[in-house]
Image (spheres, grey):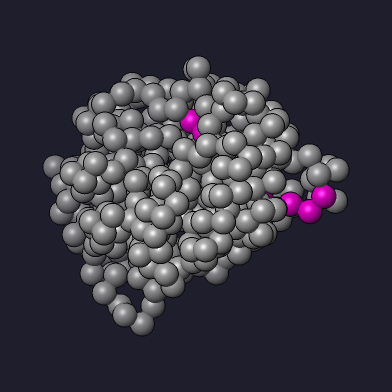
């Protein structure tokens, strides 16, 4: 037996140099929760995820410690499905958003899997399927940053120089949806001109457009001779998956979505309804790797590819494990200092690929000095 004996969480918040704005949201801090699970035979399962600022960060930790921990202490950490089902009742409270509880579950589930990998002496990418040991990486950028905060308005060019020139990433996810379709197409054309033709682009509207606006954006992009690998979350939330399907079919474009879903049931409707070509379900927001892997299998059965919304430290293992995986994502260091600074053994890219090691579990070493500097539970 390898019984769960204790669970520890450390909230981390890192101030960003300026406010990052997507279509209808703003981000001023980069946050995470480090979760550590200790077992009766001395194994430490360790992970970080759940990108939420206060007050939600505290709410997630409260659910985790007061409701989840009493349900899982004493269970065998190797019985992952049993542990996951033991946590599920914390989602049944209909008087609070269920995604709070799903993020708390994700924190524990990810650390549980790290412990399992360490117990069996295998990296998770191999334990989950072992399709490949590296994944192509794309950057995330193109945010709406005021010129006075971005060094004379050159943030887009600097991001591309970092992603492509400095690290050799294969492409970029570019933010759109806050301006008119024509203005956003101009911004993308500027990025394409700077990056050159040997650099792929996906665009992410973060649910910013109506269906007609999304179609107008596609027309404007094509008029400028730009091809898109996919169009992510093109339409507003109240349109449901049917709006995604309309953009996909009427716009003749690959559509990606799923990060705003929190369960396999929501993804089932989206996939079966023919709304997407790529599922970008987020394991850190939706119940952890256990639920993500269920969705990846569902997607594979429908010939849908899978991505993952940011969180490369977990996503790389997941995407490497399956045949329908696409790209792992990373922000710039200014947007995600946690990935670039807290992962002490983060590997360098090799020909645009993010390589994974044979170290057991997730295989990461976390910088304890960084955690101490930015923890917020003192």
Check the image and name the residue furthest to the bottom: 95
Q: What is the x, y in percent for residue 71?
A: 23, 63
Which quarter of the rendering shows the N terminus? top left
Q: For this rendering, which residue is in front, 248 or 205?
A: 248
Depicted 6 relative to depicted 121: above or below: below
Is 138 contained in the magenta span? yes
Depicted 306 relative to depicted 170: above or below: below
Work out whether residue 83 can be spotted. Answer: yes
At 54% across and 46% down in the image, what residue appears? 203
Q: For this rendering, which residue is in front, 315 or 83?
A: 315
Depicted 353 relative to depicted 297: above or below: above
Q: What is the x, y in percent for residue 263?
A: 29, 60
Q: Is residue 328 left or right of residue 111?
A: right
Is 355 contained in the magenta span? no
At 33% across and 35% down in the image, what residue appears? 325
Q: For this rendering, which residue is in front, 245 or 256?
A: 245
Check the image and name the residue furthest to the top: 351
At 82% across and 50% down in the image, what residue appears? 147
Q: Is residue 12 left or right of residue 275?
A: right
Work out whether residue 58 can be spotted. Answer: no
At 44% across and 27% down in the image, what residue appears? 136
For the magenta stretch, what is the residue range? 137-147
Query: How many numbered circles does the render carry?
Result: 0
Q: What is the x, y in percent for residue 336?
A: 60, 43
Q: What is the x, y in percent for residue 161?
A: 69, 28
Which of the 4 image quarters holds residue 103? Answer: bottom left
Which quarter of the rendering shows the C terminus? bottom right
């Amino acid at each position: 037996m390898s019984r769960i004996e204790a669970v520890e969480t450390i909230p981390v918040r890192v101030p960003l140099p300026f406010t990052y704005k997507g279509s209808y949201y703003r981000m001023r801090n980069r946050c995470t929760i480090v979760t550590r699970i200790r077992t009766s035979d001395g194994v430490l399962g360790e992970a970080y995820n759940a990108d939420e600022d206060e007050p939600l960060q505290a709410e997630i930790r409260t659910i985790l410690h007061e409701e989840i921990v009493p349900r899982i202490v004493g269970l065998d950490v190797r019985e992952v499905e049993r542990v996951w089902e033991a946590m599920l009742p914390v989602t049944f409270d209909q008087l609070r958003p269920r995604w709070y509880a799903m993020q708390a579950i994700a924190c524990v589930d990810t650390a549980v899997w790290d412990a399992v990998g360490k117990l069996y002496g295998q990296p998770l990418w191999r334990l989950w399927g072992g399709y490949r040991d590296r994944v192509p990486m794309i950057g995330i950028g193109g945010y709406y940053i005021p010129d006075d905060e971005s060094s004379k308005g050159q943030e887009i060019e600097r991001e591309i120089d970092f992603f492509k020139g400095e690290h050799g990433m294969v492409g970029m996810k570019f933010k759109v949806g806050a301006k008119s379709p024509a203005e956003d197409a101009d911004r993308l054309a500027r990025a394409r001109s700077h990056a050159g033709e040997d650099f792929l682009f996906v665009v992410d509207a973060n649910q910013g457009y109506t269906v007609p606006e999304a179609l107008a954006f596609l027309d404007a992009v094509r008029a400028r001779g730009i091809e898109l690998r996919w169009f992510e979350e093109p339409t507003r939330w109240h349109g449901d998956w049917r709006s995604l399907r309309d953009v996909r079919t009427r716009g003749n474009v690959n559509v990606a979505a799923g990060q705003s879903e929190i369960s396999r049931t929501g993804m089932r409707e989206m996939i079966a309804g023919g709304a997407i070509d790529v599922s970008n379900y987020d394991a850190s927001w939706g119940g952890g790797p256990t639920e993500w892997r269920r969705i990846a299998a569902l997607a594979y059965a429908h010939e849908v590819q899978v991505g993952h919304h940011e969180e490369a430290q977990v996503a790389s293992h997941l995407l490497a494990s399956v045949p329908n995986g696409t790209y792992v994502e990373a922000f710039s260091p200014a947007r995600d200092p946690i990935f670039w600074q807290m992962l002490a053994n983060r590997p360098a890219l090799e020909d645009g690929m993010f390589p994974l090691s044979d170290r057991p579990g997730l295989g990461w070493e976390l910088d304890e000095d960084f955690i101490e500097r930015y923890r917020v539970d003192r």
